Amino acid sequence: MTTYDDATRAAVAELLLTLADDEFILGFWDSEWTGIAPMLEEDVATSSIAQDEIGHAKAWYEMLAALTGDNPDRIAFGRPPEDYRHAALMNHPRTDWAFTVARRFLYETADSVRLEALSRSSDPEIGGLAVKMRREETYHLLHWSAWVRRLAEGGAGTHERLRAALERLWPEAESIFAPLDGEAVLVEKGILPESLSLLRDRWVERARAELEPLGLPTTTTPGPGSAGRLERTDDFRWLWGEFTMVTRSEAGATW
Amino acid sequence: MPDLVWEVFRQEAEGDPLVHGGSVRAPDEELAMHYAREFYGRRQESIRLWVVPREAIVELDDPDLLQPPFDRSFKRPSGYLIKHKLEAARQRAGAPAIVAGSAIPEPEDVG
């Protein structure tokens, strides 16, 4: 890991934690579809993508642990709910299929913009990992875009359900790009090559290009803003209880 | 969504034959590709997949064409014995005759 002064290290740690928590929490929510997705093939695909996200979270947590001298398992499973830094978008359960498709589409488009920027990071380790992840995320984006088109053009009220989910989730998806405390340092050093507000605009443009031709909403009402990564819901606390159950049952156990 | 069945063939290494992996259900080509990738490629076990709608496959299973009732053993290469021709050729060339128990296998069924 590159050696940084204290302020920069804190800023990098904050960035890595948000990247890891986004992937980790979304991966856990979507794994709730395992066994009950709309059809067997989609069940396997959704579960596999959820598993990919947990794998990406693991890679970010390991990088963070190396930077701060911590333990990746401790970071992933040993924090109280208030210490997680995922975007507000990840505060809800899987809900129905249209909700999951809407959330996945908003997240994948945002994540692709974010990873594209990070692949140009001045930090070679962050850049290298982003390049690797982008290859896997390409398929994720293809898959969820395919589902957006199918629900938008499908019968039996699927368009309406997707529209409602997108309208509800847009403002919270914005919190993926909520400003970070140490952002100025990150941008100045090229660790994050562009500001999050710039990435946010690029994301809106890309999501719009796909949604507008399908007659789906792209307007954004004001979201939680910079508080978007601090908000915690009861739904999230429930999920936290689920994914920390094993580690809490036997403190200090090793595999 | 109407479900179609797609047959998936997979290749493990460049130059290998594509072998039938199994099938997936999907409403269209795009999702069929995604599902084929998940079922027959997500563990990096394939380098190429062919995804074919089952209707596109021409099936032939007529026993009159494939399993005719007459003896067809003469169509197999083993129907032609070259043992004696080979022995004669060896003698003409002055090579010692192959005797039973020799380390060199006798090419009985080569056609």
Image (spheres, coloured by chain):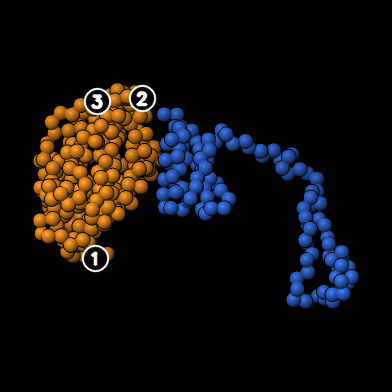
Chain colours: A orange, B blue
Quarter of the image with the N terminus of chain B in it: top left
1 or 2: tag closer to the N-terminus? 2
Q: Which residue is mark 3?
A: A217
- Above or below, A60 against A88 in this view is below
Q: Secondary structure at mark 1?
A: loop
| Chain of the residue that carries numbered disc 1 in the rendered image | A
Q: Which mark is residue A96?
A: none
| Chain of the residue that carries numbered disc 2 in the rendered image | A
Q: Which residue is mark 1?
A: A254
**Residue at point 19%, 30% (across, down):** A168
2 or 3: tag closer to the N-terminus? 2
3 or 1: tag closer to the N-terminus? 3
Marks 1/2: CA–CA distance = 49 Å
Assess disc 3: are there few (<14), some (14-19) or many (≥20) residues with their C-alpha within 10 Å of its C-alpha. Answer: some
Q: Looking at numbered disc 1 in the image, what kind of residue is underneath it?
A: Thr
Q: Secondary structure at mark 3?
A: loop
**Residue at point 20%, 51% (across, down):** A191
Quarter of the image with the C terminus of chain B in it: bottom right
Q: Which mark is residue A153?
A: 2
Q: Looking at numbered disc 3 in the image, what kind of residue is underneath it?
A: Pro
* A164, A7: nearer the viewer: A7
Q: Quadrant of residue A249?
A: bottom left
**Residue at point 15%, 28% (across, down):** A221
